[in-house]
């Protein structure tokens, strides 16, 4: 358990500079928050709560990295309340008691308390019940955060005392907005480092300055006239420091010999620094930099992301702000060390050491490719089906997800035209579970090819959808008496099950003319095709209907 002061307040100058990028980018005001406009927009629930100044207990439900903790901290700041944070993963009833004591002290001082419980679904029923009397009395405002459905994971008693707000994953555009912010912050750090190096004169930073930034570029584009200015500064610094050493020698201070030697060292260091600056900024590079940054005010950034890289990184982050920011820090640090100034897709792949073509579960590319595979199977093209299957595996798609989709294809697009397709799909999924990758992927590929070549029918799929719609419209129709269950003597006396015809006792094993629908209903949903096994099924149904006609005549 921790309060605001020991977790979130910097205790020394430059604390935020040393903090991880995600912490430095954490919003300090409500207007800094990216995303969740359905809750924070004008007139929306959380915006109204902030503006009213009256906090209420709530539960934030959403995936990781969408701002649950940030919103809780902003509420504490907005309401000038003491902020107590605890994690249900590590905490227990003892921590709850300590939080209660801390809140009581704050209440005695006339101050509100917000108790934030992360991963609240990890608390058991007894632990969750421990909050109830204090939430009820208003000792603190309870804010829980969870990635799981609170309807199943949070006690109903606690749910009834808190409002549930659903936080959404960030959109691609919102993640790209965060990337732009991160670039601006990191570039500001790099510029500050460059200015600090210039101020140091000798190029040797003090111990305090040496750790003043997390990111230090080794090379960067030269500003207009920057190389010349650096050279002049180096010469002036060399002259000034050499003169000081000579004055120390002339005045006869103790250590004159050391001062003379220092003058020589400084003079040599100045020559070395000028030579390094000249090597790092050749004439051609200076000219290019001057063309790109012709005006000093137009110098915008040390690093840039091209649009393709931003889009790729945003999709990879899968709606998780923390994930994209942490990746940004890795990418930028590696780029600065290597002297790269333009981040493209190739650099992302290199610096993150993982396949950025992997799919996010909600990305357009993912669903476009699974759609292409499904349509190729439906269109009976085994080659195209294999291509899209292989491409998704190559892109990092989970084979288990693909196996589930393959089973779905077998049921939806092949159905009873070839029931073996369902068996082969299930067997492929089972084989993958037993063998794993890459051996198990061959079984899935075999299932894909079989389904692409199999007879096609969506008759069951269409019949099911029609039946669902019909049931919704006629769901209150009573069960006919002859179809009702009659397990007791009373039910039999009431007529349940009477006049029911047992099909096995009838000719052809079929009770011709019997009605199995509620009174007045007689829809027809299943219309088998003439392809594959369904051709035989169609013939069988036609024969049974002929028996129905005979029974009515």
Image (cartoon, rainbow, N blue to C red):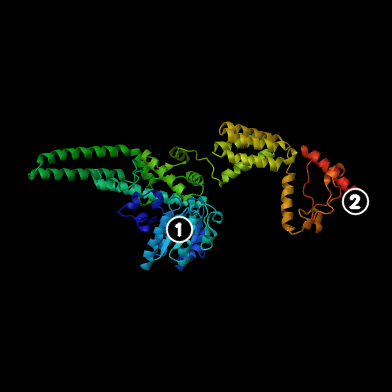
Q: Position of residue 480 (x, y in %)?
A: 80, 56
**Count of picture labels:** 2
Residue that appears at 67% across and 41% down = 409
Q: Position of residue 1 (x, y in %)?
A: 39, 55
Q: Give 439 or 94, whichever is nearer the viewer.
A: 94
**Which residue bears the numbered disc 1?**
71
Label 1 vs label 2: CA separation? 71 Å
Please rate how many residues cluster around mark 2, counting C-alpha atoms within 10 Å: few if below 14, some from 14 to 19, many from 20. Answer: few
The reply, left or right, for residue 463 in relation to residue 189 is right
**Which residue bears the numbered disc 2?**
552
Q: Give 537 or 50, whichever is nearer the viewer.
A: 537
Secondary structure type for disc 2? helix
Q: Position of residue 456 (x, y in %)?
A: 73, 39
Secondary structure type for disc 1? helix
Q: Is any part of residue 465 visible from this angle?
A: yes
Please rate how many residues cluster around mark 1, counting C-alpha atoms within 10 Å: few if below 14, some from 14 to 19, many from 20. Answer: many
Q: Give 469 or 435, whichever is nearer the viewer.
A: 435
Q: Residue furthest front?
A: 489
Q: Is any part of residue 384 visible from this angle?
A: no
Q: Which mark is residue 249?
A: none
Q: Position of residue 380 (x, y in %)?
A: 70, 36
Which dot, 1 or 2, sits closer to the camera?
2
Residue that appears at 80% across and 56% down = 492
**Eyeballing the image, is 501 above or below 114?**
above
**Eyeballing the image, is 84 above or below 363?**
below
């Amino acid at each position: 358990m921790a309060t605001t002061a020991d977790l979130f307040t910097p205790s020394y100058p430059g604390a935020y500079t040393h903090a991880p990028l995600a912490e430095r980018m954490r919003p300090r005001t409500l207007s800094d928050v990216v995303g969740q406009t359905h809750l924070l927009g004008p007139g929306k629930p959380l915006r109204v709560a902030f503006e009213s100044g009256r906090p209420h207990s709530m539960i934030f439900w959403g995936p990781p990295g969408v701002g649950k903790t940030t919103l809780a901290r902003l509420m504490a700041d907005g309401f000038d309340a003491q902020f107590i944070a605890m994690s249900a993963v590590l905490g227990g009833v003892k921590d709850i008691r300590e939080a209660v004591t801390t809140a009581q002290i704050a209440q005695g001082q006339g101050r509100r308390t917000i108790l934030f419980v992360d991963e609240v679904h990890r608390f058991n029923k007894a632990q969750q019940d421990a909050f109830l009397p204090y939430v009820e009395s208003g000792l603190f405002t309870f804010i829980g955060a969870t990635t799981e459905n609170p309807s199943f994971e949070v006690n109903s008693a606690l749910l009834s005392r808190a409002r549930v707000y659903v936080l959404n994953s960030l959109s691609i555009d919102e993640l790209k907005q965060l990337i732009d912010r991160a670039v601006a912050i990191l570039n500001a750090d790099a510029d500050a480092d460059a200015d600090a190096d210039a101020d140091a004169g000798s190029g040797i930073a003090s111990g305090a300055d040496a750790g003043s930034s997390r990111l230090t570029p080794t090379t960067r584009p030269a500003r207009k006239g920057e190389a010349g200015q650096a050279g002049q500064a180096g010469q002036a610094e060399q002259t000034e420091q050499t003169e000081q050493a000579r004055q120390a020698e002339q005045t006869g201070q103790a250590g004159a010999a050391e001062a003379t030697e220092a003058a020589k060292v400084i003079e040599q260091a100045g020559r070395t620094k000028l030579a390094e600056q000249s090597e790092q900024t050749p004439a051609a590079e200076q000219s290019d930099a001057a063309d790109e940054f012709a005006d000093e005010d137009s110098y915008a950034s040390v690093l840039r992301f091209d649009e393709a890289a931003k889009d790729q990184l945003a999709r990879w982050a899968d709606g998780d702000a923390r994930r994209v920011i942490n990746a940004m820090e890795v990418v930028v640090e590696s780029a600065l060390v290597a002297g790269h100034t333009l981040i493209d897709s190739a650099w992302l792949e290199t610096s993150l050491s993982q396949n950025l073509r992997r799919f996010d579960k909600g990305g357009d590319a993912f669903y476009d490719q699974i759609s292409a595979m499904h349509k190729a199977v439906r269109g009976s093209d085994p080659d195209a089906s294999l291509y899209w299957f292989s491409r998704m595996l190559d892109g990092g798609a989970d084979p288990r997800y693909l196996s589930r989709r393959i089973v779905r294809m077998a049921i939806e697009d092949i159905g009873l035209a070839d029931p073996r397709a369902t068996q082969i799909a299930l067997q492929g999924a089972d084989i993958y579970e037993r063998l794993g990758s890459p051996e198990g992927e061959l079984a899935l590929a075999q299932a894909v090819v079989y389904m692409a070549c199999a007879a096609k029918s969506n008759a069951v799929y269409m019949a099911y959808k029609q039946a669902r719609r019909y049931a919704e419209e006629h769901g209150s129709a009573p069960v006919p008496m002859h179809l009702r269950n009659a397990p007791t003597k009373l039910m039999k006396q009431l007529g349940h099950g009477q006049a029911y015809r047992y099909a096995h006792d009838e000719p052809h094993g079929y009770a011709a003319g019997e009605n199995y629908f509620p009174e007045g209903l007689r829809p027809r949903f299943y219309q088998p095709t003439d392809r594959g096994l369904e051709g035989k099924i169609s013939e069988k149904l036609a024969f049974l209907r002929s028996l129905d006609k005979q029974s009515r005549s």
